[in-house]
Amino acid sequence: MQVDFACNDEHGHFMGRAERVTVGELELECTLLYSGVKLETLAGQQVRVGRLVLPYSHYKYGVGNWCWDGYWLADEDVVKIINYLMRQKYWSCESGPEQGYEKFNAKQPFTVEDLKELV
């Protein structure tokens, strides 16, 4: 499943962190200015998202525009990212399907089954 990270500045230069993350129609945002979650592409087709290190199958710079990078990950790993961000103090769901929006903001963990409503 594709996960997009707003991790590049207004000139398209990588910032080392993501301020917004989208999974399907679920839009997650860090509400603390000039902050976000650490993002780093590692050797061996792995990506670091905060404290998570996860394998990805495909990467693309500039999905939508030059501020966003996309990673394609296994559904189980996408759930790990959503639940990790949910536990962080300054992350909230800004928009998305009603159940996903309410579940994220109520800090109720997602499952792989929950991803089906996001696409």
Image (cartoon, rainbow, N blue to C red):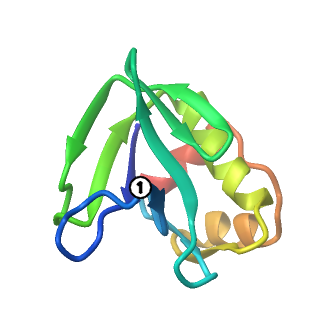
* Left or right, 70 with reference to 94: left
Q: Is residue 26 above or below residue 77?
A: below
Residue at x-position 20% and y-position 55%: 63
Q: Nearer the viewer, residue 35 or 103?
A: 35
Report the quarter where the N terminus lies: top left
Which of the 4 image quarters holds residue 42? top left
Residue that badge 1 annotates: 24
Residue at x-position 30% and y-position 57%: 14
Q: Nearer the viewer, residue 77 or 11?
A: 11
* Left or right, 62 with reference to 117: left
The residue sitting at the top extreme is 44
* Left or right, 35 with reference to 55: right
Image coords of residue 55 (percent x, y): 48, 22
Image coords of residue 3 (percent x, y): 41, 47
Q: Nearer the viewer, residue 80 or 97?
A: 80
* Left or right, 86 with reference to 35: right
Q: Is residue 46 above or below residue 12?
A: above
Residue at x-position 28% and y-position 60%: 68
Q: Which amino acid is tagged 1?
A: Gly
* Secondary element at tag 1: loop
Q: How many marks overall?
A: 1
Image coords of residue 35 (percent x, y): 57, 72
Image coords of residue 96 (percent x, y): 51, 71
Q: Residues within 10 Å of mark 1 (few under 14, many from 20)?
A: some
Residue at x-position 27% and y-position 35%: 59
Q: Is residue 77 above or below residue 4?
A: above
